[in-house]
Amino acid sequence: MKPSDPAPQTPDDRPADPRAEAFQGVRAARRSELAEDYVELIAELIHTQGEARPVDIAAKMGVTAPTVAKTLDRLAREGLVTRARYRSVFLTDEGRALAQECRRRHEIVLRFLLSLGLDAETAERDAEGIEHHVSERTLVLFSAFAIRS
Amino acid sequence: MKPSDPAPQTPDDRPADPRAEAFQGVRAARRSELAEDYVELIAELIHTQGEARPVDIAAKMGVTAPTVAKTLDRLAREGLVTRARYRSVFLTDEGRALAQECRRRHEIVLRFLLSLGLDAETAERDAEGIEHHVSERTLVLFSAFAIRS
DNA sequence: GTGATTTGTTAGCTTCGACTAACTTTATGC
DNA sequence: GCATAAAGTTAGTCGAAGCTAACAAATCAC
Ligand SMILES: [Mn+2]
Ligand SMILES: [Mn+2]
Ligand SMILES: [Mn+2]
Ligand SMILES: [Mn+2]
């Protein structure tokens, strides 16, 4: 009869499966990871060096200069940084807020791993990846554990 | 100029910066994340349903069927799965080994988060992302903590 | 001030991971 | 057995993130 009446199994963008929701959440986090690492690093460079130059960003990130340039353009498009040709990079208010939030998370995760007994180098490496995948709830527990230990 | 620069030159493909190494490690982990989630899920489907069908993979992953098809082709190219047109998917020995390893990590991270006091839903969601960024050393500490608590 | 070095940009290439649209094959219902 | 529904595939698009090569601008050394 009518092949279009019952709306069978995929009601629009509903996953309907808790697992699918988890994976979608992870994919969403993955999309913001790079922006987060960039603004965090830019804030740090501005703080320690006085300015954030693309060449330093490239060195710290371990990528080439053109990669940095393209990414910075994207961040500018997204309103996180401002830049002028051949000049160093600045954070917008939004970028600065994000950087601060990221730094906080990074710190919490790092201190937590260290308080668990992990060596500094591994802790830094793990934290750099984990920080983008911890919920606010988990951060609360991490903080509590680190303080109490 | 800044005389505080510790690494004045970048001779080969050497990062020379510990931070850059961390970021490169994270990027490497990112590249295997999807393959890991797929083989883990495929193993689970084979175990619980008897077979791993693309339609079920798509539902659990929360993506569309063509996305699954393309990813499965890539996994086949990489020697992790085998497939025949219109048939369900099988793991190679290598794929099965990877799946087992991933399941182990996933379990450790999940149990750790739960033992910290996190609710089940958030724990599952966080574990799905974190699992790809924990070193073996960290896993040891996670296991020890979960057992001890 | 000029030449060399460093830094930054642009163009173009590649792979990945997502999507939609359109099609084919397989399975189901009756 | 056949029509229809479900599952799977193919083709094509898009943006992100990496790279190299080549060039332009800025800065340094002197
Ligand atoms: Mn990070
Ligand atoms: Mn960080
Ligand atoms: Mn995962
Ligand atoms: Mn997993």
Image: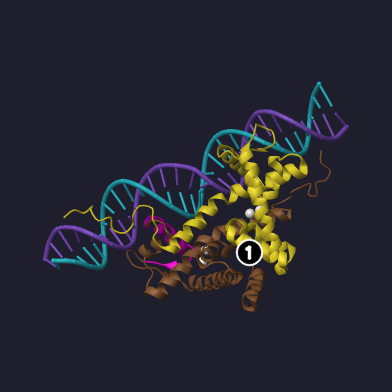
Chain colours: A yellow, B brown, C cyan, D purple
Q: Position of residue D24 (x, y in %)?
A: 65, 28
The image quadrant where one finds the N terminus of chain B is top right
- The residues colored magenta run B65-83
Residue drawn at 71 percent across, 44 percent down: A56
Q: Position of residue B129 (x, y in %)?
A: 55, 61
Magenta part, dominant SS: helix
Which amino acid, by three-letter code, is at mark 1? Answer: Leu
Instruction: Give the number of callouts.
Output: 1
Looking at the rendered structure, the secondary structure element under dot 1 is helix
Q: Would residue D3 be found to the left or right of residue A41 on screen?
A: left
Q: Would residue C15 be found to the left or right of residue B13 on screen?
A: left
Q: Position of residue B147 (x, y in %)?
A: 62, 78
Residue drawn at 51 percent across, 68 percent down: B120
The image quadrant where one finds the C terminus of chain B is bottom right
Residue that badge 1 annotates: A141
Residue drawn at 42 percent across, 58 percent down: B62
